[in-house]
């Protein structure tokens, strides 16, 4: 089983694995939510970052050890460890941040010192409206920066382009830093399309595009360990280690560059939209 998608430790597993995995104990898990603006999802307690989760993300806790909770993200099933302090039991989000980024403030006033930055995709619970401001359980933010849960943006390419120049970060899932699959997952999620967190999982989504067929806006191009989004008939956008940022690149030049640097040929072309 793929450890990234297997909600189990050696002594306890999620109830969905009964009959598939032998462990002493099974559990339905405890629903929690991320209570911090951004947190690393770790391979082990105090271990390496695998992915990241944003404020308000649902997380099902299966096990606990050394001040950390093991479980899986409700959005994509990705498993890992979070510090206990990063989780809470509520509140239930009502809206999500639909701009590249925003700030929480202690009062509805532009001159107020910010509490923290929030990335595209963060989820908040709105309790009241104050003109151009929305009040959350943790502070205020511009009402124009959020949408109700269930309402989405129309075009993942436009979303990805709003994140141009975001610095590259291995395992990154926010405006503070993105890797290739993080950019794809974030951009498509903003348009209501749930994709897995890593590029090797994303390459199984949607439909294959024959080698002789033209690529369309929003199609995905894969190499071993890398993914990019098609912008138009000659450009793509991707978070990449070459520019160390989210950047446009000529598609043919990119394919040639990756091959010349030992990254191999294009392995998959997929249409999700």
Image (cartoon, rainbow, N blue to C red):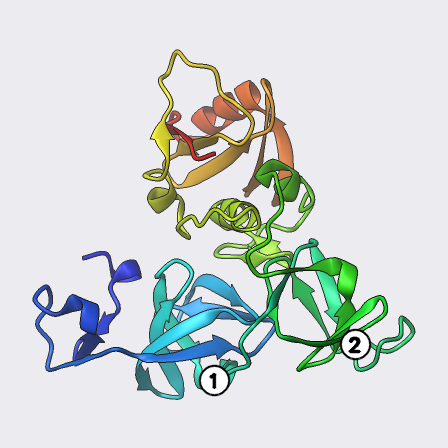
User: Can residue 221 be seen in this snapshot?
Assistant: yes
SS of the residue at dot 1?
loop
Query: Mark 2 or mark 1, which is nearer to you?
Result: 1
In the image: residue 142, left or right of residue 27: right
Identified at 36% across, 88% down, the residue is 66
- The residue to which callout 1 is attached is 89
Place of residue 156 in the rendered image (x, y in percent of width and height, measured from the top left):
58, 40
Q: Which of marks 2 and 1 is nearer the N terminus?
A: 1
Q: Quadrant of residue 46?
A: bottom left
Place of residue 189 in the rendered image (x, y in percent of width and height, measured from the top left):
52, 50
- The residue to which callout 2 is attached is 105
Q: Which of 194 and 51 is in front in this view?
A: 194
Identified at 50% across, 66% down, the residue is 53
Above/below status of 44 relative to 216: below
Residue farthest to the right, as pictured: 111
Q: Which of 24 and 177 is in front in this view?
A: 24
Above/below status of 201 relative to 258: below
Above/below status of 266 relative to 211: below
SS of the residue at dot 2?
loop
Q: In which quarter of the image is residue 232?
A: top right
Label ID, residue 176: none
Identified at 58% across, 18% down, the residue is 233
Graded by Cα atoms within 10 Å as few (under 14), some (14 to 19) or many (20 or more), the crowding at tag 1 reads few
Place of residue 173 in the rendered image (x, y in percent of width and height, measured from the top left):
54, 57
Residue farthest to the top, as pictured: 212
Graded by Cα atoms within 10 Å as few (under 14), some (14 to 19) or many (20 or more), the crowding at tag 2 reads many
User: Can residue 267 be seen in this snapshot?
Assistant: no
Q: How many labels does the image show?
A: 2
Q: In which quarter of the image is residue 60?
A: bottom left
In the image: residue 258, left or right of residue 206: right
- Specify the quadrant that holds the N terminus: bottom left
């Amino acid at each position: 089983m793929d450890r990234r998608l297997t909600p189990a430790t050696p002594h306890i597993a999620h109830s969905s694995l009964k009959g598939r995995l032998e462990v002493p104990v099974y559990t339905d898990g405890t629903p929690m939510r991320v209570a911090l603006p951004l947190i690393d999802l770790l391979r082990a307690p105090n271990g390496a970052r695998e992915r990241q989760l944003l404020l308000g993300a649902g997380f099902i806790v299966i096990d606990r050890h050394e001040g950390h909770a093991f479980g899986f993200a409700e959005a994509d099933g990705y498993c890992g460890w979070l510090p206990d302090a990063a989780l809470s039991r509520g509140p239930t989000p009502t809206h999500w941040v639909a701009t590249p980024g925003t700030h929480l403030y202690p009062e509805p006033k532009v001159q107020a010192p910010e509490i923290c930055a929030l990335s595209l995709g963060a989820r908040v619970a709105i309790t009241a409206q104050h003109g151009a401001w929305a009040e959350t359980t943790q502070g205020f933010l511009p009402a124009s920066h959020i949408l109700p849960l269930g309402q989405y943006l129309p075009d993942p390419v436009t979303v990805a382009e709003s994140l141009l120049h975001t610095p590259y970060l291995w395992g990154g899932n926010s405006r503070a830093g993105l890797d290739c699959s993080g950019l794809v997952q974030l951009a498509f999620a903003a348009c209501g399309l749930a994709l897995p967190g890593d590029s090797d999982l994303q390459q199984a989504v949607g439909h294959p595009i024959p080698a002789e067929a033209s690529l369309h806006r929003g199609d995905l191009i894969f190499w071993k360990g890398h993914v990019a989004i098609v912008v138009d008939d000659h450009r793509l956008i991707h978070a990449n280690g070459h520019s160390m940022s989210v950047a446009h690149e000529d598609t043919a030049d990119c394919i040639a560059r990756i091959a010349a640097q030992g990254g191999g040929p294009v392995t998959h072309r997929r249409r999700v939209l």
